[in-house]
Structure formats: C-alpha cells, structure tokens
Image (cartoon, helix red, strand yellow):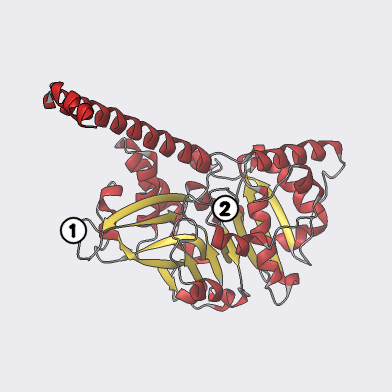
Amino acid sequence: MEAAIARAKSFPVDCNNVDKKLRQIYDMTDEEAGFHMKRSSFLYQVAVQTMPKSLHCLSMKLNVEYFLSSLHDMELSMSEKYLDPTLQHYVIFSNNVLASSVVINSTVTHSSDSRNLVFHVLTDGQNYFAMRLWFFRNTYKEAAIQVLNLEDLKLNIHDKAALLTMSLPVEFRVSFIIDGPSATNYKTEYVSVFSRAHFLLPYILHNLNRVVVLDDDVVVQKDLSNLWTLDMGGKVNGALQFCSVRLSQLNSYMLVNRSSRNSCAWMSGINVIDLARWRELDLTETYWKLEQEFSNRGGPVEAIALTASLLTFQDLIYALGDVWAVSGLGHDYGLDDRVVKNAAVLHYNGKMKPWLDLGISKYKHYWRRFINREDQFLTECKVNP
C-alpha cells in the first residue's frame, strides 16, 4: 500500500487540466440537458395540438360509413324543433365527434325533461358527415340534434363572408405575478374567448331569442334549465367571470387598452346569450369593425381575436355565479375535489384535454363516464381516453 501511495505521489498533477476537463464535462452535460428540454417541450406541443390516432380513425370510419348509407334526409323529422323558440337551445362549436357527444350526453343525462332540449352542433366540412352519422346512430333520450356545416351556410352577410370559417373558442395562456414572498411568484391561467364564428349566431339561429353556448371541452353535472329564466338585466352575455385575471393584466396580449382596468376577464365554456338583445345592439357589426380595424394595423391573429371579442362585450357581461362552473381542469392539478364535484359545469380549459393521453388523470373520470364504450366504431378504433 505504501508503495502504491508513493508511486501515485510521484506523478505530477496539474489541477488546471483537471478543472478544464470538469468544465468541459459540465458544459457538455448542460447542452445535452437543454437539448432534451427543448425536444420534450416540442413533443408536448405536438401531443396537445394533434388529434389522437384513435379519434382520427373514428372520424374517417364515420365519414366512409355515411356515404355508404342512405341517411341523407335523416334530420327532416326534427326540423320543427330546430326553429321552436319555446325550447331550450344549446350551441356547440366543435370538430371533435367524441367531445361534442360527451357534452350532449352529460347535458341530457342531467336534464329534468329531455324533450325540451335542442342541440345545434356547428362544425366544418371535413367533420360534417362524420358528425351527422354519429348523432343519427346515437340517441340522447328525446333531445333533438342538428348538425350544421358552418362553411356551407347560406347567410345574407356578403360583407362579412370571411366570418364563415369554422373556428373554435380561442384559448390564451396568461402568466402574471401574484402577491407572495417571492418576487418571481407567477401564476398561469388559460382564458378562452369567442372565436369569430360565434359572432354569426344571430344570423344562423335567426328564429331564436336565447341560447346557451357550450364549449366542446366541458362536462355538465347538473340540470341547466334555470339558465332560461335568468334575468340578465339587459346584458347580452351571461358568462363565468374570471376575477383572478383582471383586464389590466391582459394589456400585453391586447392591441389597445380601452377596457376598464379593474374589470374581471370573462370566459367561454358556458355562456347564456340573449340573441334578441344582441341583434338590437348589432354586436356582430361592432365585432366586424373592430376586427377590420385591428387587422389593418397588422396585429397577430390571436391578439385580434382577444381584443375584438373582449371589447365587443364590454359592459354587456352578466356574471354567472361560481356554482355554475369551475374551470382549470385542463391545466390545474390543485383544484378542490369538493368544488369540482359540486359544480354544474366542468371546463377543461388548458392544454391537457380529457381525450388526450396527457389529460390530468384525476379529472378524467368525470368525462369518461359519458362515453358509450360499447359503440362499434369506438371499439374498432380502440378509443380509450
């Protein structure tokens, strides 16, 4: 042992070389870690923005089956209900067959009288035939379901034809500093607002005076009939107000600052819309002018949508009580279980939708229970979110 120690001491050690080698190893490891973080972030974005293979299979099979069937006039028997203003009309903008089915199934399941329910599902040409076949094959008690191809509607809006493109509610990831012991205490929320297609509702449903708009990432847990007796006091949009986000905190996302600084942001998800009041105020024209103004400035599409939507409904929002909805199930792991169970509507706003593998596991069962797992197409496509 002494000989080994003596021999080791006989070799000169250059500490500078050791330091240099360790720094090289550190730099290489740091670069590799950065590469994997960027790749992970990229793959996450791909995962949340791409339709799962099973849902793509479902859509394709439904499309093929539609053209092999003779169901082209299958909605005629319900046409009178689609126009009846005395019934309870729901509107869903969606290009996701399974998601829209869950919204309708959960709403009907908790309704006191499904005969009064009419659903208008607005989609694009790519998903139209799949939607029609799905809702013909699947019944939801006595509710009526109309599927409309937004891109094929004949509306008298030649000056606003650009609005006739299918678009879903626009979600914004908003990060801001909150009070706390740390100066870098940030909170992230997802705020969703109406897309440009929503502003065609008074034209599409011209016989109706009130509708409830549901996003396709919600689940209904209670009867919503009381929404039709709400006195909104002349307001147009009954919405869940999001007071953890003030409009002043959205200034960096908006193109102009014309809103009240301390006003709460509002969200889509569940919205009670007074179409009669909307027409009276001509809010579609207001939105169109704002969109044109901001487009001429060359602003980003997302910023235009957010700014125009918020300003169009400024001072016209009726705040729905917190009992009506809870949001955040698509991004917030820390929601109170009791609050989630007691809410009338669950909103999976955020990137982690319940039909994705990345969806938050502890919230998925609220959504899964409204899927008909015995459906032939779901089985063939191995749909198991």
Q: Residue furthest front?
A: 2
Give the residue number, with chain letter if any, for mark 1: 183
Q: Secondary structure at mark 1?
A: loop
In front: 163, or 51?
51
State which quadrant residue 79 falls in: bottom right
| 57 vs 221: above or below | above
Q: Secondary structure at mark 2?
A: helix
| 324 vs 332: above or below | below
Q: Earlier in the sequence, mark 1 or mark 2?
A: 1
Q: Count numbered badges in the picture.
A: 2
Q: Amino acid at mark 1?
A: Ala
- Residue 203's tag is 2
- Residue 76's tag is none
In front: 215, or 28?
28
Who's the residue at 80% across and 52% down the image?
Answer: 375
Compared across the picture, whether 39 is left or right of 13 comes to right
- Give how far across and how far down residue 367 sits, in percent: 62, 61
Gap in angstroms between the C-alphas marked 1 and 2: 49 Å
